[in-house]
Image: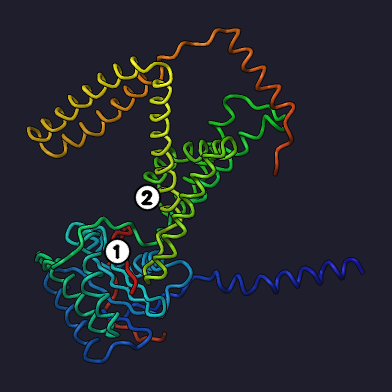
Amino acid sequence: MHARMTQLWQWVVVLCLLPALALAAPTPIPDLHDPVVDTVQVLSADQAQQLRTQALDLQARRGAQLQVLVVDSAGDEGIEAYSQRVFDQWQIGRKDVDDGVLLLLAMGDRRVRIQTGYGMEGAIPDAYAQRIIDHAIIPRLREGDPGQALIDGSALLVGLIDGEALPSVENEPGVVRLPQDWRRGDSIVAVALLAGFLLGTWARRAPQRGVVTRWWHRPVQMLAVVAVAALACAVITPGATAALAIAMLMLVPIATLLGWLWVDGRTARRVLSFLLAAAVLASAVSVYQGKPVPSLALHLLLVIVVAVVLGLISLWVAALRNSWRTGRVGFFVRLVVLCGLSGVYAWLVNRTHAQHGEDAGMVMLIAGGFFLYIAWALVMGLHQRPQTRRARKGERRRRRDDHDSGSGSSSSSSSSSSWSGGGGRSGGGGASGSW
């Protein structure tokens, strides 16, 4: 009887997992038989012929391959990952030249993407691809004319391949855009940062639970988190493994420190909670405006960066407050000296910018600003009279007694033809957009 019940439960589990397995199956890629592959029939015959003639003329004239693909949905993997699979399977562009361009439209997802081969990244930079999407394709899509959107966008792509410049855009807002797409490495970075944060909370509570740890345990654990995340990046995003690994090597320790502060201080919890609430509010505003939500990894990265900046500012303010409490005369003397030093530094930055250009001035601004911050913190914060050994022992004894007396911690079908890929490759360059 027990064996039958076990077997029955196994079948129940299998049946419950079947829908999940079906959802996890990647979206199929249609066969490549023509420069224009329209699986949902949104293009008229004249529009498809115009796009086809344009692609064939480009290939005869320049050798480059422009491919148009229209599908209903890119699936759960997202349009970026799907377009990369299409590019890899179709091998758009010539082998070793990699001069292919894929213009992908997912009607059901309301997403569009331009993906370029390695050889096209100079002629069609990501910023140009984004401009074409924002100013030529998406406006037509919002008007309900996908055919004209593809015609206008592909015409600009052909112009860039031929060496023409993009037309100027009037009244283009001079703002820096945050990335709108869910990159394939975002989830890995987000999980790594979350793991670092949880590692910090556990490390802070371990002594309270009687867990004995060595000084080297924390660095090894953080390196293990980075190593596992880098291995996942090597499997999922091989082209960006090095950059993501370096970023996580710097950000995971910061996330661990924030986890430590989350347990240790009420102020840190309030600040981090406010930043997370602001990130959620920004996502809600993006959804309300019909824009793609910035990625989770980007949100976490911004929270960490803002938290670090606020932490540096709080340390600076604390140093000023301690200096003021120690003595008014000494505080004003140090303040005058540091303000004079800051004025000299500002003059040096301005002179460097005028004589050596913007890049040298920016380097001077960043490097000098770091050392100037250190100077302010040291001069204002490290002039206190040091405690004697007996005072330090008494302070530790009082903290230990307070801890011991405190309460416990809370817990489509298609025919074949001569049109095919030529062995081109893509590293994921391009841009995406929504309408």
Of tags 1 and 2, the one toward the viewer is 1
Q: Is residue 292 left or right of residue 174?
A: right
- Above or below 311: residue 303: below
Upstream in sequence: badge 1 or badge 2:
2
Tell me where residue 423 sits by quadrant. Answer: bottom left
- Where residue 240 is drawn, which disc sits there? 2
Q: Residue at x 61, y 16 (%)?
A: 395
Dividing the image into 4 quarters, which one contains the N terminus?
Answer: bottom right
**Label 2 Cα crowd, 10 Å radius (few <14 / some 14-19 / many 20+):** some
Inspect the image, locate mark 2, and give the three-letter code of the amino acid beneath it: Ala
- Above or below 128: residue 106: below
Is residue 223 at least partly visible in the picture?
no
Nearest the viewer among 169 and 381 is 381
**Label 1 Cα crowd, 10 Å radius (few <14 / some 14-19 / many 20+):** many
Is disc 2 placed on a helix, strand or loop?
helix
Q: Is residue 28 left or right of residue 138?
A: right
- Where residue 431 is drawn, which disc sits there? 1
Q: Is residue 348 left or right of residue 12?
A: left
- Above or below 26: residue 335: above
Tell which residue pokes out farthest to the right in this image: 1
Inspect the image, locate mark 1, and give the three-letter code of the amino acid beneath it: Ala
Q: Is residue 400 left or right of residue 296?
A: right
- Above or below 165: residue 232: above
Q: Horizontal and vertical percent for residue 19?
A: 62, 74
**Picture colour scheme:** rainbow
Tell me where residue 133 sits by quadrant. Answer: bottom left
Tell me where residue 183 sits by quadrant. Answer: bottom left
Nearest the viewer among 226 and 135 is 135
